[in-house]
Amino acid sequence: MTVQRSASNVGYAVRTFRQMVRTAYPTLLILLLGVLAWPLWTSAAAMELRQFDDPAKQARYEALIKELRCLVCQNQALSDSDADLAQDLRDEVYRIIQSGKTDQEAVDFLVDRYGDFVLYRPPFNALTWLLWGGPLLLGLVGCGIVWRQWQRHRSATATPILSDADIQRLQQLRAQADRTDDHS
């Protein structure tokens, strides 16, 4: 009776699981499609159509907004950001390019207004030396710590060098130990 009851419980559990999968499958499929389509929706929202009279200006504009950082999002380029400030900065870059100014003048304007943080690759100067030298400094400190630990480990596991007197004393102690083992 117990074997039949446990077998029927297993059968019931399998049927219940199959029914749950059948009812949850469409929901999971819709959820998965939504997750996969999300990048398409977000990138479409950030895209803007700008009209330029010259394809070279269009290329300069696109290159600039990919090289400048969104100050709100921080790890997104102006071209990828949906933030209102990013929209304003794209408008400003558009006006600068349309007015005939150079790329450097556009960058200088934004740096003067917002600081070096607007650049993905800030210049090396007194304010940014730690930004550029920090990884190298941390790497050197890390290598120094590893070398020091290795030296400690090596000295702790190294076999000590015995003097001739120590070797002779060790042989005497071994001989005494062997004699006491033979007598017992």
Image (cartoon, grey):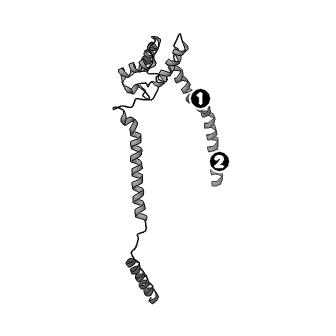
> Which one is nearer the viewer's eye here, 173 or 57?
57
The disc labelled 2 sits on which kind of residue? Ser
Residue pointed to by mark 1: 33
Pointer 2: residues within 10 angstroms few (<14), some, or many (20+)? Answer: few
Residue pointed to by mark 2: 8
Q: Which residue occupies 40% across, 77% down?
A: 164
Q: Which residue occupies 41% across, 71% down?
A: 161
| The N terminus - image quarter | bottom right
> Which one is nearer the viewer's eye here, 40 or 147?
147
Q: Which residue occupies 43% across, 64% down?
A: 157
Confirm whether residue 84 shows in the render: no
The disc labelled 1 sits on which kind of residue? Leu
Mark 2 residue element? helix
Instruction: Please provide percent x and percent y for residue 84.
Output: 42, 19
| The C terminus - image quarter | bottom left
Mark 1 residue element? helix
> Which one is nearer the viewer's eye here, 118 or 144?
144
Q: Pick whichever of labels 2 and 1 is earlier in the sequence.
A: 2
Instruction: Please provide percent x and percent y for residue 92.
Output: 42, 15
Q: State yes or no: discs 2 and 1 in contact (Cβ < 8 Å).
A: no
Mark 2 to mark 1: distance in Å? 37 Å
Q: Which mark is residue 79?
A: none
Pointer 1: residues within 10 angstroms few (<14), some, or many (20+)? Answer: few
Q: Is 8 on the left-hand or right-hand side of 101?
A: right
Q: Residue furthest front?
A: 164
Instruction: Please provide percent x and percent y for residue 174.
Output: 43, 82
Query: Which quadrant of the structure image shows residue 33?
Result: top right
